[in-house]
Amino acid sequence: MEESQELALTQFRKSVEKLSSSSEGYEKPTLMRFLVARSMNPDKAAKMFVDWQKWRVSMVSPSGFIPDSEVKDELEFRKAFLQGPTKSGHPLLLCKVSTHFPAKDQLVFKKFVVHYLDKVIASGIKGKEVGDEKLVAIIDLANITYQNLDARGMITGFQFLQSYYPERLAKCYMLHMPGFFVTVWRFVCRFLEKATQEKIVIVTDGEEQRKFEEEIGLDALPEEYGGRAKLTVLQDVFLPRSAPGMLTTNNNV
């Protein structure tokens, strides 16, 4: 297995070079995420990697992160929370959809998604980024109304995870899904890869709730979800200034 991985990595690096780019400065776990996401196909993984590099440059400044000031309007809804670590050691992303409203400025919303994902992943870095850090997500649909429905926004979030944060999602739990949201969710699922759908758990009964609490861990789970933690809004979490920027090149450039 190790030998086949090394062969795939070698071919992957060569394919990246053929696309007039470079994988220099990126460690094995980072490159393996792209290979795993493309079923160990070096050429497809290389294209995904180069597309990610170009996208990253277009979305994020040379500082390596998007500051709160660029996404202030989205943060003011206080819909995004950062908890954890979970029982498995992952940072916990929690989104309350009842305080989300479709964005008037799609670019700001996209930057908010990047800001959120970067910060959650960076919070799970211990010292130096390895490259395979993952996150656990909770999407809470309690008390939503038709005003909160935003299929476009949800698709954007999941597609960013699929295309630009490969193998970063460990698991996603969806809580309190109302009947009228089922049609919206079925539509969203058309845009999700099979591997992403397999990581999503819709919690609907007591046994699934018990497993959800067990897997997250009561120390990470906020009190209103049956745990012992206090909810922490995203902008109240402060990380070392260098941490988000590490996500670009494993801090090796």
Image (cartoon, grey):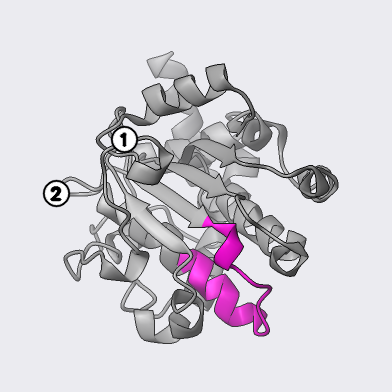
- The amino acid on which the numbered mark 2 sits, given as a three-letter code, is Gly
Give the x, y percent position of residue 229: 26, 44
Label disc, if present, on residue 52 of the rendered structure: none
> Can residue 24 be seen by looking at this rendering?
no
Label disc, if present, on residue 127 of the rendered structure: 2
Instruction: Please provide the residue range marked out in magenta.
Output: 96-114
Give the x, y percent position of residue 230: 27, 51
Residue 132 against residue 82 in the figure, above or below: above
- The amino acid on which the numbered mark 1 sits, given as a three-letter code, is Thr
Which residue: 41% across, 27% down? 213
**Total numbered labels placed on residues in the image:** 2
Residue 199 against residue 237 in the figure, above or below: above
Under circle 2, the secondary element is loop
Mark 2 or 1: in front is: 1
Which residue: 50% across, 39% down? 167
What's the magenta bit mostly, secondary-structure-wise?
helix
Quadrant of the frame with the C terminus: bottom left
Under circle 1, the secondary element is loop
Query: Of the residues under marks 2 and 1, which one precedes in the sequence?
Result: 1
Quadrant of the frame with the N terminus: top left
Give the x, y percent position of residue 123: 27, 53
- According to the image, label 1 marks what residue? 86
Crowd class of label 1 (few under 14; some 14 to 19; many from 20; radius 10 Å): some
* 127 or 46: nearer the viewer: 127
> Can residue 167 be seen by looking at this rendering?
yes
| Quarter of image, res 105 | bottom right
Specify the farthest residue to the top: 1
Q: Is residue 217 left or right of residue 117?
A: left
